[in-house]
Amino acid sequence: MKASRAPKQPSGLHSEGSGRTAPLGSSEIPPVRKGGWQPPFRKLIAGRPSLGRDEKAKMREPDPRWIVDEMLGRLSRYLRFLGYDTLYAHGIRDDQILEIVREEGRWLVTRDRDLARRAPSAFLLHRFDLQGQLEELQALYPSLRTEVRFLRCPLCNGMLVASERSRPRPPKDVPERLWASSVPIYECQDCGQSYWEGSHTEEIRRTLARLQARRTSRA
Ligand SMILES: [Zn+2]
């Protein structure tokens, strides 16, 4: 844990209302690698459905990895709340985004039609509000998870691991009383931020419940 780099803000699983977006750092955009998971389809743009039955089946297999453009910061944090490996393309050029999409096989989520056209795998969204964006994404990718998973740090996309309760001291920003309880606590391996189930998760869960209700009503 690198506690010295922990963000100075209240602990807990923060709602998107915190307004914070993770800076573009080494943990945000890892070195481009060859190979890796390849998207099972060439392109999927709203209004232009192009998935066949086989492609839909493939989409349910491995967890997709996402890269979300600069206009969709809140959505990128929600994808991390859902446990997805999600890069937030803040402050990088379109050609760099496209290189990451190609090299890492990430799925691009964007509101930029031109960028979506140039990407080998892209979801083009149109809505400005978070709930609408989640609904659009769910319509295009029906397997989108709708429950919180403590797997990825909403701030930096680092991996979360359960805190060892045998440690003599709680992690930074974790109250002693909480540390003494049985509430699971998770720490980001990159930025040191701690997370747990609490009041901050209520809005997130309400948002996701509406998404879950839409899925149920369609079933
Ligand atoms: Zn983090």
Image (cartoon, grey):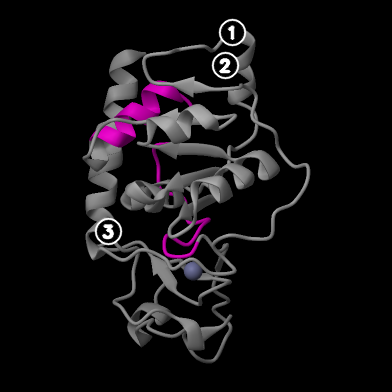
Instruction: Identify the residue at image location x=46%, y=25%.
Output: 141
Label 2 vs label 3: CA separation?
31 Å
Q: Nearer the viewer, residue 133 or 3?
A: 133
**Secondary structure type for disc 2:** helix
Instruction: Identify the residue at image location x=45%, y=46%.
Output: 68
Confirm or deny contact between disc 1 and disc 3 (CB under 8 A).
Answer: no
Q: In the image, 13: left or right of 58?
A: left
**Residue for badge 2:** 56
Name which residue type carries label 1: Arg
Q: Residues within 10 Å of mark 1 (few under 14, many from 20)?
A: few
Name which residue type carries label 3: Ser
Q: Where the C terminus falls, by quadrant?
A: top left
**Secondary structure type for disc 1:** helix
Q: Residue furthest bottom?
A: 168
Ligand 1 under 8 Å from disc 3 Cβ: no
Q: Which mark is residue 15?
A: 3
Q: Position of residue 206 (x, y in %)?
A: 23, 44
Check if residue 137 falls in the magenta segment.
yes
Of helix, strand and loop, which mostly describes the magenta segment?
loop
Q: In the image, 152: left or right of 147?
A: right
